[in-house]
């Protein structure tokens, strides 16, 4: 894997490069940058497979750098002395978040995750979603990026998705669940062509897994796992129209 290291401190880029050479031989460091602006130019010209990125840097912090190099078609591992940015890193789908001084075992695990993702087809969730929208073909298998790696799941196995603020919790037929660092709106854009419907601000359901509908002002749906899902009044007509066509 070709990698770029960006950190405003020379000592940090040299140390991380040495750690990678010793513990992660599968990583080839293409370049080390202490100037984030120069790094952004280089990344736009030749994107790496993997970017090791500091956050607090003068003139251009790590998040601003990523804004400049969009679309992000590489994996990002943040390396920082500050833990307050972890949630923001998760929200932009960073592969990992390593606190300085960097632990060699944590570094090896992060690199291993990066390698596994690159070996899998369609590892980038955003790319997969975009291709789905362009082709118009309902996805049968989707790649979902979580904190512990990339999961490939059958769309038919998803019963419903529940909003958790900026996150979405997917619930499966086998009783398991998976929390994604994506809002339900983004998940809906991916799954709606595959027979899902947003019946409530907090719920996106698989119409194939409805067990019962209870009439009411909006009504209530009982899913196959016996979970009760409310139907918003504004969504009732659309829901009834969709199930009439099943």
Image: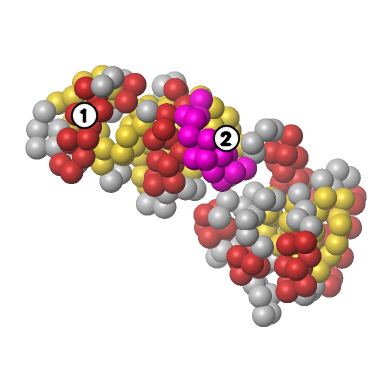
Relative to 101, is 237 on the left or the right? left
Query: Residue 125: x, y in percent?
Result: 57, 42
Quadrant (top left, top right, bottom left, bottom right) of the C terminus: top left
Q: Residue furthest front?
A: 135
Q: Does residue 52 show up magenta in the picture?
A: no
Residue in front for this viewpoint, 72 or 107? 72
Residue in front for this viewpoint, 58 or 98? 58
34 in relation to 143, above or below: below
The chosen color scheme is secondary structure
Which residue is disc 1 drawn over? 241
Relative to 147, is 226 on the left or the right? left
Q: Identify the residue at horizontal 52%, vertical 54% (top origin).
A: 91
Please tell me whether mark 2 sits on a helix, a strand or a loop.
Answer: strand
243 in relation to 49, above or below: above
Marks 2 and 1 sit apart, C-alpha to C-alpha, by 30 Å
Query: Residue 243: x, y in percent?
Result: 24, 24
Q: Identify the residue at horizontal 49%, vertical 40% (top origin).
A: 133
Q: How packed is label 1: few (under 14 Cα within 10 Å), some, or many (20 or more)?
A: few
- Which disc is residue 143 wearing? 2
183 in relation to 214, above or below: below
Query: Residue 72: x, y in percent?
Result: 64, 54
Query: Residue 55: x, y in percent?
Result: 65, 68
Residue 111 position by quadrant: top right
Relative to 146, is 46 on the left or the right? right
Majority secondary structure in the magenta region: helix
Q: Which residues are magenta?
A: 124-140
């Amino acid at each position: 894997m070709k990698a770029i290291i960006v950190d405003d401190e020379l000592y940090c880029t040299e140390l991380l490069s040495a750690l990678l050479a010793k513990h992660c031989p599968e990583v080839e460091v293409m370049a080390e940058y202490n100037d984030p602006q120069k790094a952004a130019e280089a990344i736009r010209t030749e994107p790496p497979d993997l970017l090791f990125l500091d956050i607090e840097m003068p003139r251009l912090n790590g998040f601003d750098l990523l804004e400049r190099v969009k679309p992000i078609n590489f994996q990002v591992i943040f390396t920082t002395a500050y833990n307050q940015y972890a949630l923001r890193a998760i929200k932009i789908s960073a592969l990992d978040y390593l606190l300085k001084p960097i632990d060699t075992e944590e570094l090896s695990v992060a690199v291993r995750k990066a390698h596994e993702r690159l070996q899998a087809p369609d590892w980038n969730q955003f790319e997969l979603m975009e291709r789905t929208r362009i082709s118009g073909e309902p996805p049968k298998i989707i790649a979902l990026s979580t904190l512990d790696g990339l999961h490939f799941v059958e769309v038919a196995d998803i019963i419903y998705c529940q909003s958790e603020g900026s996150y979405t919790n997917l619930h499966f037929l086998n009783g398991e669940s998976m929390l994604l660092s994506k809002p339900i709106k983004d998940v809906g854009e991916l799954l709606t062509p595959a027979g899902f419907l947003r019946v409530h601000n907090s719920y996106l359901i698989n119409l194939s897994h409805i067990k019962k509908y209870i009439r009411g002002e909006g009504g209530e749906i009982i899913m196959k796992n016996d979970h009760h899902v409310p139907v918003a009044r504004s969504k009732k007509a659309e829901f009834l129209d969709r199930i009439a066509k099943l």
